[in-house]
Image (tube, grey):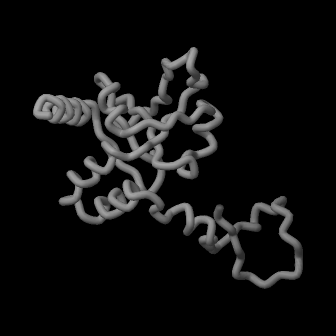
């Protein structure tokens, strides 16, 4: 939540009806700071990876074992196990499954479109995707995306690991 404050001293109440009543300063609240803070191991790895690209392998490893959420238009139940994850389109026009590291990172507008959150392991998402990429925490500071060809490489790595076990 952002709080807008004016640096002008005025005794007149601001009712929002005057177009000249525009805020000229943005103050970050403790709630904003708390939301931005990394809370899980995966979020901490993601934050570190954003600052050091050489950690991208560690970020992907953390993703594969992390629990993430995707949104579905329909509730996933014992009877209805076939969830249709919400898809977004990246700037290049490719479809991407939207994933979130926590429920507090899901924008309300997305919940309006697909109100059911489904918790899964990152590797489960990789195994399930075919010709589609994913984006973690779209629109958030702690965000990254893997295009469809990257998902195919990750899927192949999972298969190699399984064969060697």
Please tell me which residue is depicted at 18% across the width and 60% down the height of the picture. Answer: 54
- Looking at the image, which residue sits at the far bottom? 9
Is residue 26 visible from the viewing direction of this image?
Answer: no
Q: Which residue reaches farthest top?
A: 79
Q: Determine the residue located farthest toward the left in the rendered image.
A: 164
Q: Which of the 4 quarters of the picture holds residue 25?
A: bottom right
Place of residue 125 in the rendered image (x, y in percent of width and height, measured from the top left):
36, 32
Q: Nearer the viewer, residue 119 or 133?
A: 119
Question: Which of the 4 image quadrants contains residue 135?
Answer: top left
Q: Is residue 14 above or below residue 131?
A: below
Name the spot of residue 87 as percent of width and height, x first.
46, 29
Q: Residue at x 65, y 61 (%)?
A: 1
Task: Note whether residue 132 is visible.
Answer: yes
Apparent side of residue 153 relative to residue 21 in the rendered image (left or right): left
Please tell me which residue lies in front, 124 or 11: 124
Q: Is residue 145 above or below residue 80?
A: below
Position of 78 relative to 8 (above/below): above
Is residue 111 left or right of 97 when viewed as pictured?
right
Q: Quadrant of the C terminus?
A: top left
Query: Is residue 32 shown above or below 79?
Result: below
Q: Nearer the viewer, residue 23 or 115?
A: 115
User: As drawn, is 39 to the left or to the right of 10?
Assistant: left
What residue is rendered at 49% in x and 65% in y? Answer: 37
Residue 80 position, x and y percent, is 55, 16
Front-lying residue, 88 or 115? 115
Residue drawn 55% across and 69% down? 33
């Amino acid at each position: 939540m952002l709080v807008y404050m004016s640096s002008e001293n005025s005794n007149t109440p601001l009712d929002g009806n005057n177009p000249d009543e525009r805020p000229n300063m943005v103050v970050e609240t403790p709630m904003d700071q708390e939301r931005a803070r990394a809370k899980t191991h995966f979020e901490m790895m993601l934050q570190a990876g954003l600052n050091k690209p050489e950690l991208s392998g560690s970020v992907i490893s953390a993703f594969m074992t992390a629990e993430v959420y995707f949104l579905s238009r329909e509730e996933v139940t014992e009877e209805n196990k076939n969830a249709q994850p919400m898809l977004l389109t990246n700037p290049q026009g490719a479809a991407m499954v939207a994933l979130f590291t926590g429920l507090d990172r899901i924008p309300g507008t997305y919940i309006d479109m697909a109100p059911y959150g489904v918790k899964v392991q990152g590797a489960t998402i990789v195994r399930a995707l075919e010709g589609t990429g994913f984006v973690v925490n779209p629109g958030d500071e702690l965000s990254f995306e893997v295009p469809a060809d990257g998902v195919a490489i990750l899927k192949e790595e999972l298969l190699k690991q399984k064969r060697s076990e």
